[in-house]
Amino acid sequence: MQSSPRSEIEAMYTKMANYFMDGVLDVPIEAEYTLDQIAEALPHAGREGRSGKILLTPQGALS
């Protein structure tokens, strides 16, 4: 990818973003943490067998 032209990289990211928005790709979220909970978030992110992403949400919960 490093040797790909910028236009190809941008097209790939646009395609991927559209897949997420259209629901073709799904990224499960296991937990959300605010920045003041970083001490809890880091060990959680390092656990094996997680079922989804661990998000840091500086503005508060997404849901």
Image: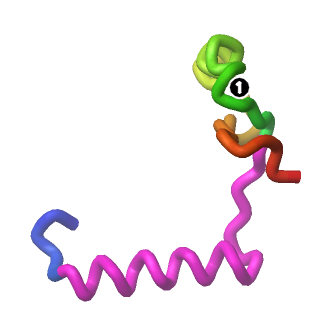
Residue 32, image quadrant: top right
Where residue 23 appears, as percent x and y from the top left, is 76, 76
Say few, some or many: other residues with alpha carbon within 10 Å of mark 1 (under 14 / 14 to 19 / 20 or more).
few
Please give the name of the residue rendered at 68% of the width and 35% of the height, measured from the top-left corner: 54
Q: Is residue 7 left or right of residue 47?
A: left
Residue identified by numbered label 1: 49
**Vertical side of 16 occupied by 28: above or below:** above
Q: Is residue 41 left or right of residue 51?
A: left
**Vertical side of 41 occupied by 33: above or below:** below
Where residue 37 appears, as percent x and y from the top left, is 71, 20
Please give the name of the residue rendered at 79% of the width and 34% of the height, measured from the top-left corner: 31
Circle 1: residue type: Gly
Q: How many marks?
A: 1
Which image quarter is the N terminus in?
bottom left
Residue closest to the eye, 51 or 62: 62
- Secondary structure under tag 1 reads loop
Q: Is residue 3 left or right of residue 25?
A: left
Where residue 42 appears, as percent x and y from the top left, is 60, 18
Where residue 2 appears, as percent x and y from the top left, is 16, 64
Q: In the image, which residues are magenta?
A: 6-29
Whether 10 is among the magenta residues is yes
